């Protein structure tokens, strides 16, 4: 044990431990690939047992170092080329690695696809452990021969191997989890396996491949893959910052063959071919309407109080009869003096029949009004509408005042677009040439779909109409002719107040600007 006092022996021990770990990294990688074929509950046991048997085998090989040193003597000749026992081991081991790497690549690329629709078939425990031991035997050749050539004391060699294997045993589980979670790493490691196998065969046939070149290529590939994994992680982080609903909608569109809207792309030189559109505008708007429906508030779908048609029991009979004949609605809120004093909901034909036969509306025939709070979620509102059997639903604020009315057709319009009644004009009129005439009460979600842009809807704000958006931008009640601009990504629009009705914006003129014409630093022009 006099070597314990020799500083050179300790330097050799440390160097050999580092070298054994470096030479054993590839072994760990392929163990990770092998144990992935086992059921999850058996993987840890196979890894520990395989590495333990591999340690015992390496120690046995080291005890036979005197015999291994003599393996360089030629056993036979083929022509002028002599083959020693070491050469035969390298050739057989190299072909084994080539076969194993090719088989694993085929299994990863083809085999898993064939069993993708059924239950996964796991390999036998003994088979995997045997393969781990055989693989380690092949990888041990270089490390054992290196140990024999580096130090003179068998105790140093065994200590270095034991310490290196203990470190590998501790690191094997996290490394196995990492490798199996990243398929590109698996493919890269299988490429290393083929490269090492080729170098062993070449060395066995006396065509020595400098190990420095081999390790330099492996290290370079590992660095490239590390950068690739880093880039993927950054992309995932950036993707996670986007709203979940937006990512879901984009994924659905991609599955249906539609690319998400993006900025302008350079035209192709091949006849400036345009990509095939799997979705038309109407289809895209409907998909978008469904996916964003639950994010909308009730104000964005309801008919506001100022536009609600209601029956006043205190009005003259002739006036009520003319109103029922004139307006196309099937149901009306029936109130006493004001919309807030709701008595019930009546069907138009029944109300008209009462006026003709009885000279007035019989309150006993009215249906019980359904009133919801303005904070209700859209999906809950839809359930309420289902239970209403086609009746309208009244929306009240925190003070009990009626602020609007919702019907099933309003929900349908939120998905499929506007369906104006006979007495209504469309909220959005396309005038051509990138110009639109928009009613102040037009829904912002629908307007975004028509303009093929976003940036108008703000979930943190309470407005849901273009009038509310402009009031938020101006910070005051504007005058006719006041303008402001929206610059968002590649889109630019100018909004001009076209008409006022009392204290509300009645109409807005929208004009699409060329991207370079819009100044992103200009928020408003008055």
Image (cartoon, grey):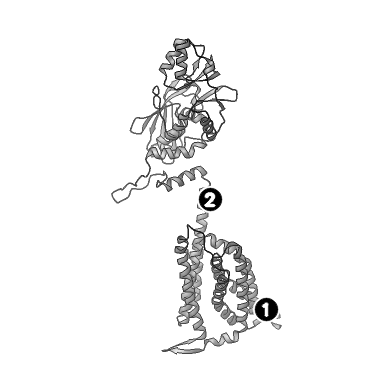
Q: Residue furthest front?
A: 357
- Percent x, y for residue 513? 38, 35
The answer to whether one can see residue 276 in this image is yes
What residue lies at 65% left-to-right and 73% top-to-bottom? 163
Q: Are marks 1 and 2 in contact (CB under 8 Å)?
A: no
Q: Is the residue marked by circle 2 packed among few (<14), some (14-19), or many (20+) residues within 10 Å?
A: few
**Residue 348 at x, y percent in the picture:** 45, 19
Instruction: Please identify, in this view, whether the residue under mark 1 or under mark 2 is nearer the observer.
Output: 2
* Nearer to me, 242 or 46: 46
Distance from Cα at disc 1 to Cα at disc 2: 50 Å
Which of 311 and 267 lies nearest the eye of the viewer? Answer: 311
Q: Which residue is mark 2?
A: 237
What is the crowding at mark 1: few (fewer than 14 residues within 10 Å), some, or many (at least 20)?
few
Instruction: Give the image quarter of residue 128.
Output: bottom right
Tell me if residue 12 comes above or below residue 315 in the rendering: below
Nearer the observer, 360 or 276: 360
Residue 325 is tagged as: none
For label 2, the SS is: helix
In the depicted view, which residue is nearer to us: 497 or 398? 398
Number of dots carrying numbers: 2
> How far across and how far down the image is residue 444, in percent?
46, 32
- Looking at the rendered structure, the secondary structure element under dot 1 is helix
The quadrant where residue 510 appears: top left
Residue 472 visible to the viewer? no
**Sequence-wise, which precedes: disc 1 or disc 2?**
1
On residue 7, the disc is 1
Residue depicted at x 54% and y 63%: 179
Question: Where residue 245 sits: x, y (%)?
Answer: 50, 42
Q: Quadrant of the N terminus?
A: bottom right
């Amino acid at each position: 044990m006099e070597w314990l006092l020799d500083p050179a022996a300790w330097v050799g021990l440390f160097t050999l431990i580092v070298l054994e770990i470096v030479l054993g990294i590839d072994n760990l990688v392929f163990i990770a690939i092998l144990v992935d074929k086992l059921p999850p509950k058996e993987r840890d046991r196979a890894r520990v047992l395989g590495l333990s048997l591999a340690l015992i085998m390496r120690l046995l090989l080291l005890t036979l170092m005197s015999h291994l040193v003599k393996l360089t003597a030629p056993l036979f000749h083929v022509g002028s080329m002599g083959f020693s026992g070491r050469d035969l081991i390298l050739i057989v081991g190299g072909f084994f690695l080539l076969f194993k790497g090719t088989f694993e690549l085929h299994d990863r690329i083809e085999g898993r696809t064939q069993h993708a629709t059924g239950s996964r078939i796991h390999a036998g425990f003994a088979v995997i452990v045997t393969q781990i031991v055989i693989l380690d035997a092949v990888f041990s050749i270089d490390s054992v021969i290196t140990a024999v050539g580096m130090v003179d004391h068998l105790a140093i060699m065994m200590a270095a191997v034991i310490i290196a294997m203990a470190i590998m045993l501790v690191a094997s589980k996290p490394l196995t989890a990492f490798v199996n979670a990243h398929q590109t790493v698996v493919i890269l490691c299988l490429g290393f396996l083929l490269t090492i196998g080729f170098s062993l065969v070449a060395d066995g046939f006396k065509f020595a491949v400098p190990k420095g070149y081999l390790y330099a290529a492996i290290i370079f590939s590992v660095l490239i893959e590390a950068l690739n994994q880093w880039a993927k992680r950054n992309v995932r982080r950036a993707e996670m910052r986007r709203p979940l609903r937006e990512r879901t909608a984009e994924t659905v569109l991609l599955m249906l063959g539609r690319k998400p809207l993006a900025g302008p792309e350079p035209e192709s030189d091949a006849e400036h071919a345009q990509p095939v559109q799997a979705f038309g505008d109407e289809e895209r708007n409907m998909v978008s309407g469904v996916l964003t429906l639950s994010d909308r508030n009730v104000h964005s779908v309801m008919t506001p109080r100022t536009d609600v048609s209601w029956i006043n029991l205190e009005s003259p009979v002739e006036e009520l009869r003319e109103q029922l004949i004139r307006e196309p609605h099937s149901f009306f809120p029936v109130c006493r003096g004001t919309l807030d004093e709701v008595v019930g909901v009546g069907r138009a034909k029944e109300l008209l029949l009462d006026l003709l036969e009885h000279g007035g509306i019989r309150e006993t025939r009215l249906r019980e009004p359904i009133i919801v709070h303005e904070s209700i979620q859209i999906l809950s509102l839809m359930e309420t509408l289902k239970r209403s059997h086609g009746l309208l639903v009244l929306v009240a604020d925190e003070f009990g005042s009626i602020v609007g009315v919702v019907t099933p057709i309003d929900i349908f319009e939120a998905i499929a677009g506007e369906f104006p009644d006979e007495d209504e004009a469309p909220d959005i009129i396309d005038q051509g040439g990138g110009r639109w005439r928009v009613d102040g009460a037009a829904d912002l979600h629908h307007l975004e779909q028509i303009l093929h842009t976003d940036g108008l809807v703000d979930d943190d704000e309470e407005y849901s109409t273009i009038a509310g958006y402009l009031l938020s931008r101006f910070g005051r009640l504007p005058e006719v002719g006041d303008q402001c601009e929206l610059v968002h990504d590649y889109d630019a629009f100018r909004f001009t107040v076209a008409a006022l009705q009392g204290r509300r914006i009645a109409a807005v003129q929208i004009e699409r600007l060329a991207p370079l014409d819009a100044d992103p630093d200009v928020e408003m022009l008055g």
